[in-house]
Amino acid sequence: MPLRRRRRHYQQLTEFKRGRIVGLRESGFSFRDITERLGRNVPTVHDCWQQWSREGAASRRPGSGRPRGTTEREDRRVRRMAAAHRITSAAEIRAAVGTTVTQRTVTNRLLQGQLRARRPVVCIPLTRNHCRLRRGVKLELIGGWSGDLLCFLMKARSALVPVMAVCWLEGGQVSACNQPVCGLDTLDLHLELWSGEQFPMAAGALLWLSHAP
């Protein structure tokens, strides 16, 4: 049987039980009588008494593993801040607490407290030009015509970039810019527009159509 499986239900002696072992032993009880009273085995009780006899203290020795990077007070601050500010990310919590641990450690502390930090979501990188187009500003394209702009976006790694602009003209006609905004050629998409025409376009994956009213 693996050692980890054998020790699954093993519990360390508390300070109270260590004190009881020392008190019962000084009162004249044998090791077997103490084990029957406390529900522990004889070697555990014997080691506790030997430590008291040698060192004059029965406290548990510090383990040989790696010490924790955060204190209990810092852990409480991390959990309290995550509960009070639901939209705060792990990096922001780490900066606010002022601890020297990594962001992953802060996330682990939150998971231990049944909490989660906010994960930043990749959004469309909007510029002032995009905002101006969304307000319905008319642009002059081919032949001096003007209409509403329809912007096709494609996915480039973790961001969305504009690929091609199509102008909706008066009367249901459609005019497309032959020159794409981005020069990434990965996949040919044929977009069937409302007018029934098809425009081939070199793009990655069509994700969103942003049509200004």
Image (tube, rainbow, N blue to C red):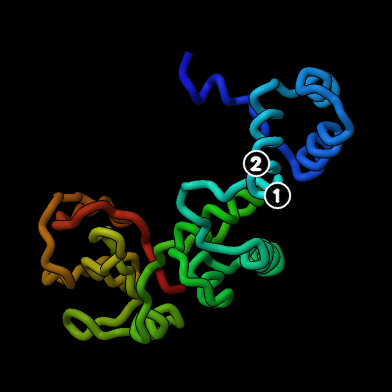
Residue 180 locus on image (x, y percent): 15, 69
Image quadrant assignment for residue 80 = bottom right
Query: Which circle marks residue 51 in the picture?
Result: 2
Query: Which circle marks residue 196 in the picture?
Result: none
Label 2's element?
A: helix
- Tag 1 or tag 2, which sits nearer the N-term? 2
Left or right, 4 with respect to 185, comes to right
Q: Residue furthest right?
A: 27
Is residue 99 shown above or below 119? below
Instruction: Specify whether residue 39 is in view.
Output: no
Q: Residue at x 46, y 73 (%)?
A: 213
Query: Which circle marks residue 57 in the picture?
Result: 1
Residue 65 locus on image (x, y percent): 47, 47
Using the image as rendered, state which of residue 96 and residue 120 is in the foreground. 96
Image quadrant assignment for residue 48 = top right
Q: Looking at the image, do the residues carrying marks 2 and 1 touch, with CB atoms under 8 Å apart? A: yes
Label 1's element?
A: loop
